[in-house]
Image (cartoon, grey):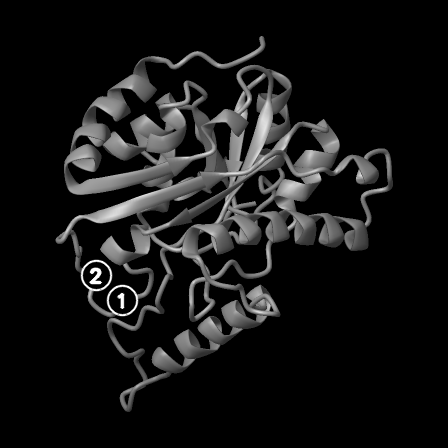
Amino acid sequence: MSRRRIGFWYRFAAVLAKPPLLLLFKRDWRGMEHIPAEGGFITVVNHNSYLDPLSYAHFQYNTGRVPRFLAKDSLFRGGFVGAVMRGTGQIPVYRESVDAAHAFRAAVEAINKGECVAFYPEGTLTRDPDLWPMEGKTGAARVALLTKAPVIPVAQWGAHEAVPPYAKRKRLRLFPRKTLRVLVGPPVDLSRYHDREPTVELLREVTDVIMDAITELLVELRGEPAPAHRHARDRALAADRMRAAGAVRPAGNGTAAAGAVPDGAAEGENA
Protein backbone atom coordinates (compact mmCIF):
# COMPACT_ATOMS: atom_id res chain seq x y z
CA MET A 1 0.00 0.00 0.00
CA SER A 2 1.52 3.34 -1.01
CA ARG A 3 -0.81 5.65 0.91
CA ARG A 4 -3.77 5.51 3.27
CA ARG A 5 -7.22 6.26 1.95
CA ILE A 6 -9.30 8.93 3.65
CA GLY A 7 -11.96 6.76 5.22
CA PHE A 8 -15.43 7.42 6.58
CA TRP A 9 -14.37 8.53 10.05
CA TYR A 10 -11.79 11.03 8.83
CA ARG A 11 -14.30 12.51 6.37
CA PHE A 12 -16.93 12.61 9.11
CA ALA A 13 -14.54 14.40 11.49
CA ALA A 14 -13.70 16.87 8.70
CA VAL A 15 -17.40 17.60 8.11
CA LEU A 16 -17.71 18.52 11.79
CA ALA A 17 -14.45 20.40 12.27
CA LYS A 18 -13.78 22.26 9.03
CA PRO A 19 -16.79 24.64 8.96
CA PRO A 20 -16.04 26.28 12.34
CA LEU A 21 -12.32 26.43 11.55
CA LEU A 22 -13.05 28.11 8.21
CA LEU A 23 -15.51 30.51 9.82
CA LEU A 24 -13.53 31.47 12.90
CA PHE A 25 -9.94 31.58 11.64
CA LYS A 26 -7.87 32.95 8.81
CA ARG A 27 -5.14 30.72 7.35
CA ASP A 28 -1.58 31.22 6.22
CA TRP A 29 -0.51 27.82 4.88
CA ARG A 30 2.81 27.35 3.14
CA GLY A 31 4.95 24.42 2.05
CA MET A 32 2.28 21.90 1.07
CA GLU A 33 4.54 20.81 -1.77
CA HIS A 34 6.85 19.21 0.79
CA ILE A 35 4.17 16.71 1.90
CA PRO A 36 4.98 13.49 -0.03
CA ALA A 37 2.33 12.40 -2.51
CA GLU A 38 3.12 8.72 -2.01
CA GLY A 39 4.76 6.44 0.54
CA GLY A 40 5.10 6.50 4.29
CA PHE A 41 6.55 9.50 6.08
CA ILE A 42 6.83 11.27 9.43
CA THR A 43 5.85 14.82 10.27
CA VAL A 44 7.35 16.54 13.32
CA VAL A 45 5.41 19.53 14.65
CA ASN A 46 5.90 22.10 17.41
CA HIS A 47 3.23 22.38 20.11
CA ASN A 48 2.10 25.63 21.77
CA SER A 49 -1.70 25.39 22.05
CA TYR A 50 -4.39 22.80 22.71
CA LEU A 51 -5.80 23.87 19.34
CA ASP A 52 -2.64 22.74 17.50
CA PRO A 53 -3.74 19.19 16.61
CA LEU A 54 -7.02 20.38 15.11
CA SER A 55 -5.33 23.20 13.22
CA TYR A 56 -2.62 20.95 11.83
CA ALA A 57 -5.02 18.11 10.99
CA HIS A 58 -7.06 20.62 8.95
CA PHE A 59 -3.93 21.65 7.04
CA GLN A 60 -2.75 18.14 6.28
CA TYR A 61 -6.23 16.83 5.46
CA ASN A 62 -6.26 19.37 2.65
CA THR A 63 -3.08 17.84 1.20
CA GLY A 64 -4.86 14.49 0.76
CA ARG A 65 -2.43 12.74 3.13
CA VAL A 66 -4.16 12.34 6.47
CA PRO A 67 -1.96 12.04 9.57
CA ARG A 68 -2.11 9.47 12.34
CA PHE A 69 -1.35 11.21 15.62
CA LEU A 70 0.06 9.62 18.74
CA ALA A 71 -2.29 10.52 21.61
CA LYS A 72 -2.79 9.57 25.24
CA ASP A 73 -4.70 6.31 25.62
CA SER A 74 -7.47 7.85 27.78
CA LEU A 75 -8.86 9.59 24.68
CA PHE A 76 -9.68 6.19 23.15
CA ARG A 77 -11.87 4.95 26.01
CA GLY A 78 -15.47 4.94 24.88
CA GLY A 79 -17.76 7.82 23.99
CA PHE A 80 -17.91 9.83 20.80
CA VAL A 81 -14.31 11.10 21.04
CA GLY A 82 -13.06 7.55 21.53
CA ALA A 83 -15.01 6.36 18.50
CA VAL A 84 -13.52 9.12 16.35
CA MET A 85 -10.00 8.45 17.61
CA ARG A 86 -10.30 4.75 16.87
CA GLY A 87 -12.13 5.25 13.58
CA THR A 88 -9.55 7.69 12.22
CA GLY A 89 -6.72 5.34 13.14
CA GLN A 90 -4.96 7.45 15.73
CA ILE A 91 -2.31 5.67 17.80
CA PRO A 92 -2.73 5.35 21.59
CA VAL A 93 0.25 6.01 23.84
CA TYR A 94 0.22 4.01 27.07
CA ARG A 95 2.53 5.92 29.34
CA GLU A 96 4.48 4.15 32.10
CA SER A 97 3.02 0.72 31.36
CA VAL A 98 4.07 -2.58 29.78
CA ASP A 99 2.19 -1.43 26.66
CA ALA A 100 4.27 1.76 26.26
CA ALA A 101 6.22 0.31 23.31
CA HIS A 102 2.97 -0.37 21.41
CA ALA A 103 2.94 3.19 20.03
CA PHE A 104 6.39 2.74 18.48
CA ARG A 105 5.46 -0.57 16.87
CA ALA A 106 2.18 0.87 15.55
CA ALA A 107 3.95 3.94 14.18
CA VAL A 108 6.59 1.84 12.38
CA GLU A 109 3.91 -0.46 10.98
CA ALA A 110 1.83 2.48 9.71
CA ILE A 111 4.79 4.12 8.00
CA ASN A 112 5.85 0.84 6.39
CA LYS A 113 2.31 0.59 4.98
CA GLY A 114 2.66 3.97 3.32
CA GLU A 115 0.93 6.14 5.91
CA CYS A 116 1.87 9.36 7.68
CA VAL A 117 2.52 9.47 11.42
CA ALA A 118 2.59 12.91 13.06
CA PHE A 119 4.82 13.44 16.10
CA TYR A 120 4.91 16.28 18.57
CA PRO A 121 8.55 15.68 19.58
CA GLU A 122 8.29 17.86 22.67
CA GLY A 123 5.72 15.39 24.00
CA THR A 124 3.65 18.13 25.60
CA LEU A 125 2.92 21.85 25.29
CA THR A 126 6.13 23.86 25.31
CA ARG A 127 7.11 25.33 28.65
CA ASP A 128 9.32 27.94 27.01
CA PRO A 129 8.06 31.35 28.26
CA ASP A 130 8.07 32.71 24.70
CA LEU A 131 6.61 29.51 23.20
CA TRP A 132 9.71 28.43 21.28
CA PRO A 133 10.20 24.67 20.86
CA MET A 134 11.89 23.10 23.85
CA GLU A 135 14.04 19.97 23.95
CA GLY A 136 12.40 17.00 22.26
CA LYS A 137 11.86 13.39 23.23
CA THR A 138 13.59 10.76 21.13
CA GLY A 139 10.54 8.83 19.88
CA ALA A 140 10.39 10.46 16.44
CA ALA A 141 14.14 9.96 15.98
CA ARG A 142 13.86 6.30 16.91
CA VAL A 143 11.03 5.66 14.44
CA ALA A 144 12.81 7.67 11.73
CA LEU A 145 15.96 5.56 12.02
CA LEU A 146 14.00 2.31 12.06
CA THR A 147 11.95 3.15 8.95
CA LYS A 148 14.35 5.51 7.10
CA ALA A 149 11.18 7.34 6.06
CA PRO A 150 11.22 11.05 5.15
CA VAL A 151 10.98 13.31 8.20
CA ILE A 152 9.04 16.47 7.33
CA PRO A 153 9.44 19.42 9.76
CA VAL A 154 6.40 21.59 10.42
CA ALA A 155 6.07 24.85 12.35
CA GLN A 156 2.77 26.22 13.65
CA TRP A 157 1.99 29.66 15.02
CA GLY A 158 -1.16 31.58 15.88
CA ALA A 159 -3.34 28.98 17.60
CA HIS A 160 -2.00 30.13 20.97
CA GLU A 161 -3.62 33.52 20.42
CA ALA A 162 -7.05 31.87 20.40
CA VAL A 163 -6.34 29.14 22.95
CA PRO A 164 -3.42 30.19 25.19
CA PRO A 165 -1.48 27.16 26.45
CA TYR A 166 -1.44 27.87 30.18
CA ALA A 167 -3.94 30.63 30.75
CA LYS A 168 -5.34 30.57 34.28
CA ARG A 169 -8.81 30.88 32.79
CA LYS A 170 -9.42 28.54 29.85
CA ARG A 171 -11.22 31.14 27.76
CA LEU A 172 -11.37 31.18 23.98
CA ARG A 173 -10.15 34.38 22.37
CA LEU A 174 -11.71 34.13 18.94
CA PHE A 175 -12.20 37.79 18.01
CA PRO A 176 -10.76 39.53 16.20
CA ARG A 177 -10.19 36.51 13.96
CA LYS A 178 -6.79 34.93 14.46
CA THR A 179 -4.59 33.56 11.69
CA LEU A 180 -3.49 29.92 11.94
CA ARG A 181 -0.07 29.73 10.33
CA VAL A 182 1.54 26.49 9.14
CA LEU A 183 4.91 26.28 7.39
CA VAL A 184 6.28 22.97 6.10
CA GLY A 185 9.92 22.52 5.19
CA PRO A 186 11.81 19.99 3.06
CA PRO A 187 12.72 16.61 4.60
CA VAL A 188 15.37 16.64 7.30
CA ASP A 189 18.52 14.96 5.99
CA LEU A 190 19.21 12.10 8.39
CA SER A 191 21.07 9.89 5.91
CA ARG A 192 24.34 10.19 7.85
CA TYR A 193 22.68 8.48 10.81
CA HIS A 194 21.28 5.52 8.90
CA ASP A 195 22.73 2.07 9.63
CA ARG A 196 24.36 3.29 12.84
CA GLU A 197 23.73 1.82 16.29
CA PRO A 198 20.81 3.76 17.84
CA THR A 199 22.56 4.62 21.09
CA VAL A 200 21.12 7.11 23.55
CA GLU A 201 23.68 9.66 22.38
CA LEU A 202 22.83 9.13 18.71
CA LEU A 203 19.08 9.40 19.31
CA ARG A 204 19.66 12.61 21.26
CA GLU A 205 21.71 14.04 18.40
CA VAL A 206 19.10 13.11 15.79
CA THR A 207 16.37 14.63 17.96
CA ASP A 208 18.34 17.87 18.20
CA VAL A 209 18.68 17.97 14.40
CA ILE A 210 14.91 17.51 14.08
CA MET A 211 14.16 20.22 16.64
CA ASP A 212 16.59 22.59 14.89
CA ALA A 213 14.69 22.14 11.62
CA ILE A 214 11.36 22.91 13.30
CA THR A 215 12.81 25.94 15.08
CA GLU A 216 14.25 27.36 11.84
CA LEU A 217 10.79 27.23 10.28
CA LEU A 218 9.25 28.91 13.31
CA VAL A 219 11.86 31.68 13.07
CA GLU A 220 10.59 32.31 9.54
CA LEU A 221 6.95 32.28 10.65
CA ARG A 222 7.52 34.60 13.61
CA GLY A 223 10.05 36.89 11.94
CA GLU A 224 12.30 36.98 14.99
CA PRO A 225 15.38 35.06 16.17
CA ALA A 226 15.10 31.99 18.36
CA PRO A 227 16.81 31.90 21.76
CA ALA A 228 20.41 30.72 21.84
CA HIS A 229 19.55 27.73 24.02
CA ARG A 230 16.54 25.45 23.89
CA HIS A 231 14.35 25.23 27.00
CA ALA A 232 15.16 22.14 29.08
CA ARG A 233 12.14 19.87 28.84
CA ASP A 234 12.86 17.51 31.74
CA ARG A 235 13.74 20.35 34.09
CA ALA A 236 10.55 22.21 33.21
CA LEU A 237 8.35 19.16 33.75
CA ALA A 238 10.12 18.39 37.03
CA ALA A 239 9.31 21.93 38.17
CA ASP A 240 5.67 21.33 37.19
CA ARG A 241 5.60 18.21 39.36
CA MET A 242 7.16 20.07 42.29
CA ARG A 243 4.57 22.83 42.02
CA ALA A 244 1.82 20.23 41.86
CA ALA A 245 3.17 18.47 44.94
CA GLY A 246 3.22 21.75 46.81
CA ALA A 247 -0.32 22.57 45.69
CA VAL A 248 -1.70 19.30 47.08
CA ARG A 249 0.23 19.32 50.37
CA PRO A 250 -1.87 18.10 53.34
CA ALA A 251 -4.21 20.68 54.80
CA GLY A 252 -4.58 21.26 58.51
CA ASN A 253 -7.00 18.35 58.90
CA GLY A 254 -4.68 15.96 57.08
CA THR A 255 -6.60 15.98 53.79
CA ALA A 256 -5.29 17.19 50.44
CA ALA A 257 -6.23 20.64 49.30
CA ALA A 258 -9.10 20.48 46.83
CA GLY A 259 -8.88 21.51 43.23
CA ALA A 260 -5.07 21.43 43.05
CA VAL A 261 -4.31 20.49 39.49
CA PRO A 262 -1.13 21.72 37.80
CA ASP A 263 -1.24 23.62 34.53
CA GLY A 264 -1.21 21.18 31.65
CA ALA A 265 -1.91 18.15 33.86
CA ALA A 266 -4.33 16.77 31.31
CA GLU A 267 -1.83 17.07 28.47
CA GLY A 268 -0.91 13.69 27.04
CA GLU A 269 2.75 13.16 26.24
CA ASN A 270 3.70 11.94 22.83
CA ALA A 271 6.13 9.06 22.45
On the rendered structure, is 17 left or right of 193? Answer: left
Residue at screen point 33% across, 21% down: 10
What is the quadrant of the C terminus in the image?
top right
What is the quadrant of the N terminus in the image?
top right
Is residue 70 visible from the viewing direction of this image? yes
- Using the image, tell me which numbered label, if any, was put on residue 167: 1
- Whether residues under marks 2 and 1 lie with C-beta atoms below 8 angstroms apart, the answer is yes
Give residue 259's position: percent from left, percent from top.
Answer: 25, 71
Mark 1: which secondary structure? loop
Identify residue type, mark 1: Ala
Q: Residues within 10 Å of mark 1 (few under 14, many from 20)?
A: few
On the rendered structure, is 84 left or right of 202? Answer: left
Q: Tell me the quarter of the picture where residue 8 sits.
A: top left
Mark 2: which secondary structure? loop
Q: Residues within 10 Å of mark 2 (few under 14, many from 20)?
A: few
Q: CA distance from mark 2 to mark 1?
A: 6 Å
Residue at mark 2: 170
Give residue 31's position: percent from left, percent from top.
Answer: 47, 33
- Using the image, tell me which numbered label, if any, was put on residue 115: none
Give residue 100's position: percent from left, percent from top.
Answer: 59, 42
